[in-house]
């Protein structure tokens, strides 16, 4: 089974599920989001948001393919680009962190470790760009797929709670806490991309 993660662009945006392409829960503030839905323009607003973030900040998502079939995606950006984040009781996201906005995996492909690989890929990208952490709002009462990720899933892939809340805790993943985390990311990516493993170079004591 061939797996690959590619950057989200305007070209592959149509490969996201239709309900996700038309969702601007995070991308607009509540009032603007409601107005976009009433006007029938949420897909245009989503495209404009992704275009602006790509131009101003850079890569803000990944699409997951298994055997060339799009089966999931993840979105992330600095909190300044995520108006809805200020509406949460545990906001704001820390100034040194990028927000993991949302993610989704097709039900038939869940339970195969793709969620962890997505988080590791985001971590790798953000470490290269000099960021210290990823933060996310979790749903502690999650029951079905929604815009807010289940808190249990975030905890399972390495996040820690930094601001508790009975419904929407804020969680954080430190990117540079240990070298082993970085090595784990490298190893996961090597396996994901089918890279040939090299012998570790000896280092002077």
Image (cartoon, rainbow, N blue to C red):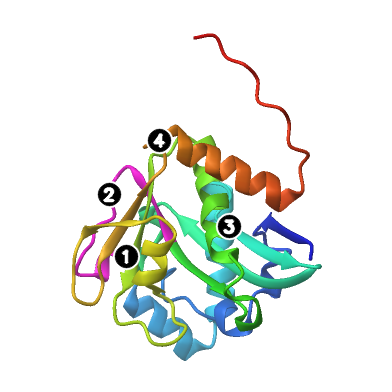
Tell me how far mark 2 sits from mark 1, CA to CA. 11 Å
Residue under pointer 3: 117
Q: Which residues are magenta?
A: 85-100
Q: Is residue 195 above or below residue 135?
A: above
Task: Mark 4 vs mark 1: give the one in front.
Answer: 4
Q: Going from the N terminus, do you reach mark 3 or mark 1 first?
A: 1
Badge 3: residue crowd in 10 Å (few <14, some 14–19, many ≥20) = some
The answer to which image quadrant residue 89 occupies is bottom left
Q: Which residue is mark 1?
A: 85
Mark 2 or mark 1: whose residue is earlier in sequence: 1
Q: Residue at x 29, y 55 (%)?
A: 93
Q: Position of residue 115 (x, y in %)?
A: 54, 65
The earlier-in-sequence mark between 4 and 3 is 3
Q: Is residue 132 magenta?
A: no
Mark 4 neighbour class, 10 Å CA radius: few under 14, some 14 to 19, many 20 or more = few
Tell me the CA gap for discs 2 and 3.
Answer: 24 Å
| CA–CA distance in space, label 4 to label 3 | 18 Å
Residue ID at (54%, 56%): 52
The correct choice, above or below, for 12 with respect to 172 in the image is below
Q: Mark 3 against mark 1, which lies toward the viewer?
A: 3
Disc nearer the start of the sequence (4/2): 2
Measure the C-alpha gap from mark 3 to mark 1: 24 Å
According to the image, label 4 marks what residue?
A: 178
The answer for how far apart the CA atoms under marks 4 and 2 are is 20 Å
**Label 1 element class:** helix
Dividing the picture into quadrants, the one containing residue 3 is: bottom right
């Amino acid at each position: 089974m061939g797996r690959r993660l590619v950057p989200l662009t305007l070209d592959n945006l149509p490969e996201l599920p239709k309900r996700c392409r038309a969702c601007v829960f995070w991308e607009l503030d509540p009032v603007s989001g409601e107005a976009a839905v009433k006007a029938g323009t949420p897909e245009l607003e989503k495209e404009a948001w992704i275009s602006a973030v790509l131009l101003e900040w850079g890569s803000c998502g990944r699409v997951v393919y298994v055997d060339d079939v799009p089966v999931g995606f993840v979105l992330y950006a600095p909190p300044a680009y995520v108006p809805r984040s200020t509406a949460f009781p545990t906001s704001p996201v820390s100034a040194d962190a990028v927000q993991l906005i949302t993610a989704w995996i097709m039900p038939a492909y869940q339970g195969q470790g793709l969620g962890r690989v997505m988080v590791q890929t985001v971590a790798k990208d953000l470490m290269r760009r000099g960021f210290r952490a990823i933060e996310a709002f979790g749903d502690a009462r999650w029951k079905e797929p929604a815009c807010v990720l289940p808190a249990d899933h975030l905890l399972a892939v390495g996040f820690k709670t930094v601001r508790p809340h009975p419904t929407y805790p804020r969680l954080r993943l430190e990117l540079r806490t240990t070298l082993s985390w970085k090595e784990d990311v490298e190893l996961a990516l090597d396996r994901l991309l089918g890279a040939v493993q090299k012998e570790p170079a000896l280092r002077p004591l």
